[in-house]
Each structure stands twice: as structure tokens, then as C-alpha cells.
Image (cartoon, rainbow, N blue to C red):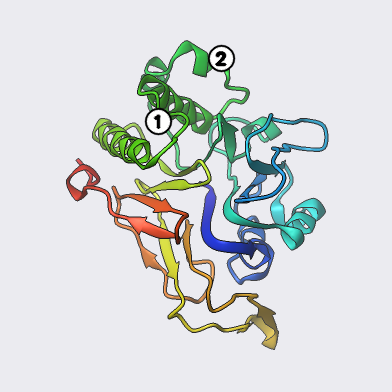
């Protein structure tokens, strides 16, 4: 098992609360999920570039990517990055390994062709999935996990339909239909548990099958609490403005706000602009077969 987190916000947001400060932040959860961490941050404007670590670059995708193999809560670098992390979109992950050893190449999120992907679950029928991947996408795999194999399959399907780069709303509607069909088919095949977050920085998909997943929507009408109580009588600052809107996706409730659990077999689409919002996906295609 692992824990994943996605945030889509209307303005630059500081992510320290959910990464290192809240009672069920990723740093705390890493005590049970100690096998590496990853943070992918997307900014709508400003410098681009994807940095995996201090020595390796992944090209000109508009994501900032950082990873480590130590438990997040014990990793000084994770805490330093969390303290200064700001963006419009976050995909973060802490790993409890099931397939593949603890190594940097096996930590999530994975990034390729502008898409970022994080997975929670275990794919039982990897041969079935591998047979559906193109040779090109299989050769791009650098690690040992079922999760990266799953991402290669998603990219294969995007390639087949000319949807790797989404230029307009029509293409985003097409990829939504594709992801709805893809997830429904894999649920019917019972290939294993596959919760995931997939994003190109504008459109984000979240899917639940076999693991817990929760959503939180924040809008201008919601009360703003700058201080939140935590353990031992202390408090933390949320740094949240009244005008900010956001959608949060997480494996469990990170804060004490009114999160709601997503039904098993559900696919969500979240658009970042003009304001973060969940766009319904056809209910008939997203239920467990």
C-alpha cells in the first residue's frame, strides 16, 4: 500500500500543511509507508523544468519533480522542499513497496510527455497489462514496479488516439472518454487495485478501485480558519485566502475538514481553469463491472 495526494488550486498555494504539518500529513503517514517519496509541482506561470534529483533532468516538461528513498518524515530534504513548495497543482506520493525494491526509479510520481502519474494499489496481472503496452512505452520504463507499467499502458492508449498533448477542450473531452473506457475495462478484468492520480497540469484524473480515496472541495463560501489546533495544544497556520478555490484528492482525510469518500469504481476529472472544479464522468462507465 501507498498514500497519494493531489491538489488543484486557483492560485499559488503553499503545500507545507499537507506535506509536513497536518495531523495526517504525508510526513506522518510515512511511518507506515517508508519506502520513498515524490513531489511533483506544476506552476501555471514562471520557469519550467523537471528536476528528479540534483544530477538528473527530465527535459522541458512544466513540472518540478523531487524524489527520495528515505522515509519522508525522516528526510531533511523532504522537509526543506515542503517548506518552500508553492504551485497551482501538486501530485505527491509516499511508498510502501509491494512490487520492486526501494530505489529512486521506483518512487512515484512518474513523469513522461508532460503527464504525471501516481498509483496506490497492486496490479496482480502484470503480464496482461504488459501485452497491451507498445514497445516504445515499455522501453521507457526505468524501474521495476507494476505502477510504472500501468503508466506505460495509459501512455500507450493516449498514443494510439493521438491524445498525449491536449490542445483544446475537445481533446480533453476525448481523453476523458478514453480514461473512462480504460478504467472500466481494467476493473472488469480484475487486474488488481488501481487508485491513481494522472495530470498534465490542466486536467487531472483521479480513480478509485480497491483502495480508499477521498475528495475535498474548497470555495469562496467556505470559512477560512488561519489557525488549526493540532496535538499538545499547538496550532498551525493554513495560509488560505478567502478567494482561493481548490480540489483535494487523498488516500485518507489529511485535515479535519469535510472530506467525502469516493465510491469504489469512480473516475473523477478535475479542471484547473477557469476555477478548479470536478467535471462529472458518465456514471454508467465508472461503476464496478
Residue 263: x percent and y percent? Answer: 29, 56
Which residue shows up at 63% across the image and 76% down it?
238
Whether residues under marks 2 and 1 lie with C-beta atoms below 8 angstroms apart, the answer is: no
Which residue is found at the position 82% from the left and 37% from the top?
Answer: 54
Residue 191: image x %, image y %?
34, 31
Q: Which mark is residue 194?
A: none
146 shown above or below 70: above
Assign the C terminus to one quadrant of the image: top left
How far from the left and from the top, in percent, is residue 36?
67, 44
Number of callouts: 2
Extreme residue toward the left, this view: 284
> Which quadrant of the structure image shows residue 214?
bottom left
Residue situated in front as seen by the camera: 143 or 286: 286
Residue under label 1, please give it. Answer: 124
Residue shown at 58%/35% (left/top)?
Answer: 110
Classify 134 as above or below 192. Answer: above
Label 2 CA crowd tier, 10 Å (few <14, some 14–19, many 20+): few
135 shown above or below 197: above
Q: Is residue 51 left or right of residue 217?
A: right
Secondary element type, mark 1? loop
- Mark 1, other Cα within 10 Å: few <14 / some 14–19 / many ≥20: some
Q: Please report whichever mark, 2 or 1, sits nearer to the chain's N-terminal start.
A: 1
**Disc sitting over residue 139 in the figure:** 2
| Residue 200 visible in the displayed image | yes
Q: Residue at x 62, y 64 (%)?
A: 13
The residue positioned farthest toward the top in the image shown: 135
Q: Residue 74, how many percent across, how many down?
A: 76, 55
Q: Nearer the viewer, residue 185 or 156?
A: 156
User: Can residue 103 be seen from the camera position used here?
Assistant: no
Q: Label 2 vs label 1: CA separation?
A: 21 Å
Local SS, label 2: helix
Amino acid at each position: 500500500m501507498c498514500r497519494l495526494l493531489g491538489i488543484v488550486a486557483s492560485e499559488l498555494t503553499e503545500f507545507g500543511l499537507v506535506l509536513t504539518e497536518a495531523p495526517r500529513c504525508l510526513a506522518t503517514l510515512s511511518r507506515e509507508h517508508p519506502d520513498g517519496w515524490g513531489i511533483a509541482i506544476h506552476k501555471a506561470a514562471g520557469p519550467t523544468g523537471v528536476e528528479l534529483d540534483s544530477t538528473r533532468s527530465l527535459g522541458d516538461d512544466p513540472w518540478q519533480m523531487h524524489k527520495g528513498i528515505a522515509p519522508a518524515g525522516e528526510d531533511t530534504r523532504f522537509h526543506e522542499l515542503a517548506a518552500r513548495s508553492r504551485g497551482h497543482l501538486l501530485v505527491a506520493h509516499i511508498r510502501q513497496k509491494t512490487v520492486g525494491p526501494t530505489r529512486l526509479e521506483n518512487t512515484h510520481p512518474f513523469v513522461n510527455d508532460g503527464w504525471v502519474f501516481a498509483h496506490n494499489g497492486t496490479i496482480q496481472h502484470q503480464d496482461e497489462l504488459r501485452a497491451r503496452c507498445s514497445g516504445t512505452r515499455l522501453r521507457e520504463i526505468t524501474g521495476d514496479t507494476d505502477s510504472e507499467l500501468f503508466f506505460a499502458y495509459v501512455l500507450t492508449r493516449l498514443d494510439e488516439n493521438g491524445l498525449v498533448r491536449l490542445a483544446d477542450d475537445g481533446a480533453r473531452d476525448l481523453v476523458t472518454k478514453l480514461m473512462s473506457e480504460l478504467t472500466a475495462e481494467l476493473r472488469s478484468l480484475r487486474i488488481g487495485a488501481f487508485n491513481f492520480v494522472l495530470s498534465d497540469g490542466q486536467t487531472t484524473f483521479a480513480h478509485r478501485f480497491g483502495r480508499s480515496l477521498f475528495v475535498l472541495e474548497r470555495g469562496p463560501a467556505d470559512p477560512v480558519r488561519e489557525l488549526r489546533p493540532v496535538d499538545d495544544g499547538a496550532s498551525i497556520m493554513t495560509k488560505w485566502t478567502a478567494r482561493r478555490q481548490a480540489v483535494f484528492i487523498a488516500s485518507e482525510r489529511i485535515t479535519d475538514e469535510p472530506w467525502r469518500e469516493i465510491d469504489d469504481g469512480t473516475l473523477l476529472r478535475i479542471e484547473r481553469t477557469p476555477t478548479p472544479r470536478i467535471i462529472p464522468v458518465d456514471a454508467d462507465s465508472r461503476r464496478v463491472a
